[in-house]
Image: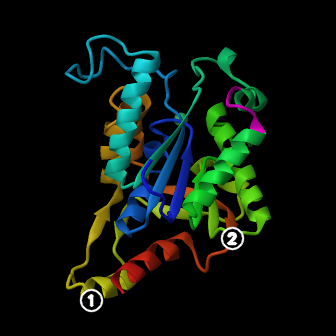
């Protein structure tokens, strides 16, 4: 891990490919607004499925199905590439156990996952330490367990990060600007307030002022969706990302986030635009 620096955004995800599937638009947009991004992946995804034989075979991808540690190695590399496409500055691996998720009989309870990962207390301390270390304005994670049922490891990450945010706030060292959880568009009713990140970002008036100062007066459209799809395609072994994900995200117009904590003035979009002003000014 490189030298410490202050992050603007600190993302927590369960698996390599989560960063691209459900957070890709926000990450791509924030990076292009000059925000510093740190991404923490809880697992290396060793229990996933390699989509061999339907994936390409080459020097990096052998002519046999990758499993276990060999699959994890490839997936870590895929995540590294995807994160570089999206614009994350640092990839932190926790290397926790990834459990099989093939059928209902493999469902684990929240308690079972937390125990396999070293227990709730140790996990909360570890995540609180990461928040302290990277000192972000905004923390982002999947939602904890709710009626909007998700992969049990996504829910466990959400549970731990929410506890860590609470712990961090309780210490009174510093107040976070925000804590956002990804929200399924189908579950809008669960939350009071939501922030959207549109797939195509047209550089707005405030950004234009900065562009003019920088000598780039032209209006620019950043196609965040294209960046997200490019990131998804890096997950060559993963059907859910590089095939199904590319197809489903091609037509999704936005990502939605619920602020479980928000002390910043204005909206998420305001915060994203403000960085451009600072960077330009
Ligand atoms: Zn996942």
Question: Image point 59% across, 22% down: which residue?
Answer: 101
Q: Is residue 220 left or right of residue 175?
A: left
- Near mark 1 (Cα within 10 A), the count class, few <14, some 14-19 or many ≥20, is few
Is residue 226 left or right of 263 when viewed as pictured? left
Q: Position of residue 211 (x, y in %)?
A: 27, 82
Quadrant occupied by the C terminus? bottom left
Write the start and end of the magenta stretch as one range. 116-120
Q: Which residue is mark 1?
A: 213
Residue at 65% x, 55% y: name it. 188
The image quarter in which residue 106 lies:
top right
Q: Residues within 10 Å of mark 2 (few under 14, many from 20)?
A: few
Q: Residue furthest front?
A: 3
Q: Does the magenta portion include 261?
A: no
Q: Position of residue 142 (x, y in %)?
A: 61, 47
**Residue 276 pos. (x, y %):** 39, 77
Against 113, is 120 above or below? Answer: below
- Which quadrant holds residue 257? bottom right
Q: Main secondary structure of the magenta part?
A: loop
The label on residue 174 is: 2
Vertical relation: 268 (above or below) 75: below
């Amino acid at each position: 891990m490189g030298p410490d620096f202050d992050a603007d955004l600190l993302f927590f995800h369960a698996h390599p490919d989560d960063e691209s599937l459900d957070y890709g638009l926000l990450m791509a947009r924030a990076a292009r607004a000059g925000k510093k991004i740190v991404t923490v992946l809880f697992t290396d995804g060793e229990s996933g499925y390699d989509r061999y034989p339907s994936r390409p075979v080459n020097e990096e991808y052998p002519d046999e199905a990758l499993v276990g540690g060999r699959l994890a190695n490839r997936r870590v590399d895929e995540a590294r590439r995807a994160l570089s496409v999206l614009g994350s500055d640092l990839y932190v691996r926790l290397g926790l156990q990834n459990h099989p998720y093939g059928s209902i009989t493999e469902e684990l309870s929240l308690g079972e996952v937390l125990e396999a990962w070293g227990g709730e207390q140790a996990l909360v301390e570890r995540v609180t330490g990461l928040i302290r270390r990277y000192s972000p304005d905004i923390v982002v994670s999947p939602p904890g367990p709710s009626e909007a049922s998700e992969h049990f490891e996504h829910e466990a990450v959400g549970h731990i990060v929410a506890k860590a945010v609470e712990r961090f706030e309780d210490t009174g060292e510093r107040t976070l600007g925000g804590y956002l959880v990804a929200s399924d568009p189908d579950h809008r009713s669960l939350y009071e307030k939501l922030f959207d990140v549109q797939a195509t970002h047209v550089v707005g008036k405030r950004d234009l002022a900065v562009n003019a100062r920088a000598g780039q007066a032209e209006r620019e459209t950043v196609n965040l969706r294209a960046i997200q799809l490019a990131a998804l395609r890096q997950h060559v072994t993963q059907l859910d990302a590089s095939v199904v994900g590319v197809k489903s995200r091609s037509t999704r117009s936005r990502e939605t986030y619920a602020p479980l904590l928000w002390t910043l003035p204005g909206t998420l979009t305001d915060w994203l635009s403000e960085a451009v002003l600072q960077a330009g000014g």
